Amino acid sequence: MAVKKYLLPQVDRFFKANLHTPSTISDGKLTTEELKEKYKAQGYQIMAFTDHEICVDHQDLCDEDFLAITAYEIATTDINDPERRTYHMNLFSKDPHNTRQVFF
């Protein structure tokens, strides 16, 4: 069985991507559809919608010129740090339909 990849390697082509974009699903100001439209107009072909603490399959936004990567952002606070700093990490799914959040 062949393994599907998000993108096939192409040595003669570069992709413009945004790998950290929250939408109105969490703390963003635009919907995923609005973000796609705005970023495509600026030449982007790839976006990871990294809403906080929720992983959503956005494959319905994919077309021949646009790839939506299934991803999410998780925040964790260092309880051993006297300043209680919070760190943010973006996690990306290998399978675009897998929305299981591995951090929880």
Image (cartoon, rainbow, N blue to C red):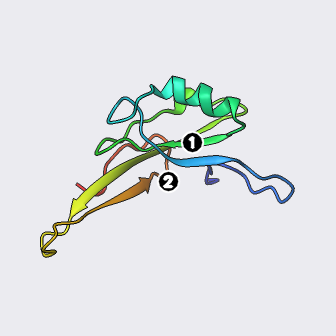
Q: Residue at x 77, y 53 (%)?
A: 14
Please report contact status of discs 2 and 1: CB closer than 8 Å, yes or no: no
* Relative vertical location of residue 78 with respect to residue 60 in this rendering, above or below: below
Point out residue 62 in the picture as x, y percentages from the top left corner.
61, 31
Point out residue 38 in the picture as x, y percentages from the top left corner.
60, 28
Q: Nearer the viewer, residue 59 or 32?
A: 32
Point out residue 16 in the picture as x, y percentages from the top left corner.
69, 47
Point out residue 66 in the picture as x, y percentages from the top left corner.
66, 35
Q: Residue at x 41, y 55 (%)?
A: 90
Amino acid on which the number 1 mark rests in the picture: Met
Residue 88's disc number: none
Q: Which residue is mark 2?
A: 94
Amino acid on which the number 2 mark rests in the picture: Lys
Quick one: SS at disc 1? strand
Left/right placement of residue 12 relative to residue 33 reads right
Q: Quadrant of the C terminus?
A: bottom left
Left/right placement of residue 6 relative to residue 101 reads right
* Relative vertical location of residue 94 with respect to residue 83 in this rendering, above or below: above
Residue 75, by quadrant, is: bottom left
Badge nearest the viewer, 2 or 1: 1
Q: Which residue is mark 1?
A: 47
Quick one: SS at disc 2? loop
